[in-house]
Structures are given as C-alpha cells and as structure tokens.
Image (cartoon, rainbow, N blue to C red):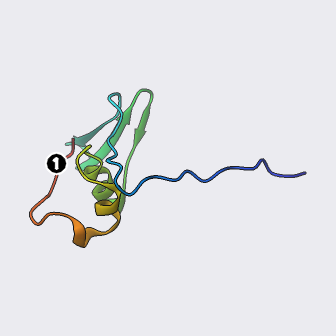
Amino acid sequence: MNAPHRERAIVDAEARPRLPRHVRLHFDEMRQAWALLSPEKVLWPDETSLAILRLCDGQTSVDAISHPKKRKKGHHPGPG
C-alpha cells in the first residue's frame, strides 16, 4: 500500500508568521511553565520551541527567525 503523497510547504523567507487569533502563549504560574493555548488544546513547548513561537509576532521574518544573526540587536519579543 502506498502512502499518500504530501507536498512540502514552501514559505517565503520574507513572510512574517504570527499565531492565529485563537492561539496564545500563557505563563502558567502553578507549573512555572509556558503553555500554548488553543481551543480544546494545551501544548507545553520546550525552550527551543518557545523561543521560536515568541518570534512569530507578525514582525519578524522567517529569514530572521531561522538566522538569529540577522535579527535586530535587542529585539526580544514577549509572549504575544
């Protein structure tokens, strides 16, 4: 049986990703951890994932996210 063919999504280097309106980062005081909240879902990102999610602010390009040296110095976006 053949697996279904999937096409790889190509994202423009200048695209500026952002979290959808219904998704947000939230710091859980009880667990002392960041959670990614979505309707009926809670994800607990690790440090690397959290760093990338914080950069999905609608201002930072995919190129800057994937090449940290290209980011503006001092640009440390908050959780959203």
Q: Which residue is mark 1?
A: 78
Which quarter of the figure has residue 64?
bottom left
Q: Is residue 52 above or below residue 30?
A: below
Q: Position of residue 19 (x, y in %)?
A: 33, 39
* Nearer to me, 44 or 61: 61
Residue drawn at 39 percent across, 32 percent down: 38
On the picture, is 45 further left or further right than 54?
A: right
Residue drawn at 37 percent across, 48 percent down: 44
Q: Position of residue 32 (x, y in %)?
A: 22, 50
Mark 1 crowdedness (10 Å alpha carbons): few <14, some 14-19, many ≥20:
few
On the picture, is 20 further left or further right than 9?
A: left
Q: Quadrant of the C terminus?
A: top left
Q: Residue furthest right?
A: 1
Residue drawn at 28 percent across, 58 percent down: 51
* Nearer to me, 74 or 79: 74
* Nearer to me, 46 or 53: 53
Which quarter of the figure has residue 26?
top left
Counting labels gives 1
Amino acid residing under circle 1:
Gly
Q: Position of residue 16 (x, y in %)?
A: 31, 47
Q: Secondary structure at mark 1?
A: loop
Q: Is residue 29 above or below residue 55?
A: above
Q: Position of residue 27 (x, y in %)?
A: 22, 43
Q: Residue furthest left?
A: 74
